[in-house]
Amino acid sequence: MIDISGKGTTRRMAVAMARVGLSDAALEALRAGTLPKGPALEVARLAGIMAAKKCSELIPFCHQVPLDHVQVEVKPGDGSVEIRATVRAKAATGVEMEALTAVTVAALTIYDMCKALDPAASITEVRVLRKSGGKHGDWSFEGHLPCPPRDA
């Protein structure tokens, strides 16, 4: 783990997103709350919150950060479900890993709960949208398209 003992404590915030691509039938069942495994939108939201709180237990070199706030939004749209997480803390290190972990676990939860209706479901666009605090100050990637795949 990196030594952060010399870093100052600042207000930190990160927003991350993920998208789960689903068939029309799976999206319809998701919206109606008729999936065989239950109410996926609320289960995914809670799973994301739990994941942010457990981030340092899942990622070996991630610092434990006392979180002040975790918000996970799970919204079905046209052809996909968009997941956004906002995480805040007063800490010596950033909270982008907690936000990314939240959206990834929420996306995996949607995938798991919808895979019986849509075996071709996909998880895409996992990324940090913005963050603030620390030596880099405010940083935003919102409005940019995801990076294209690299040539093999």
Image (spheres, grey):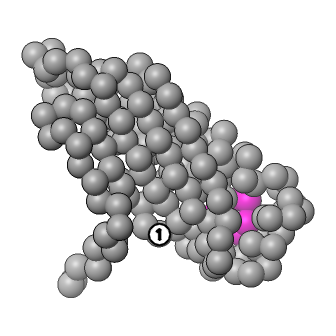
| Magenta range | 111-115
Q: Is residue 128 found left or right of 136 in the rendered image?
A: right
Residue 115 x %, y %: 71, 69
- Asked whether residue 67 appears in the rendered view, the answer is yes
Outermost residue to the top: 5
Considering the image in quadrants, where does the N terminus appear?
top left
Residue 146 at what x, y percent from top left?
Answer: 34, 72
Going by the image, does 87 lie left or right of 25? left
- Identity of the residue drawn at 21% across and 84% down: 151
Q: Residue 68: say if magenta.
A: no
Give the main secondary structure, helix, strand or loop, of the magenta stretch. Answer: helix
Q: Residues within 10 Å of mark 1 (few under 14, many from 20)?
A: some
- Compared to 26, does 7 lie above or below? above
Magenta-colored stretch includes residue 114: yes
Q: Could you say which quadrant of the image residue 36 lies in?
A: bottom right
Identity, as a three-letter code, of the amino acid under mark 1: Thr
Q: Where is residue 17 in the image (x, y as percent from the top left)?
A: 46, 56
For disc 1, the marked residue is 124
Q: Residue drawn 50% across and 28% down?
A: 69
In the image shown, does 40 or 79 lie closer to the viewer?
79
**Residue at 78 percent of width and 64 percent of height:** 30
Q: In this view, does 110 lie above or below 132?
A: below
Callout 1: SS:
strand
**Does any portion of residue 59 appear in the rendered image?**
no
Where is the C terminus found, in terms of image quarters? bottom left
Residue furthest to the bottom in view is 151
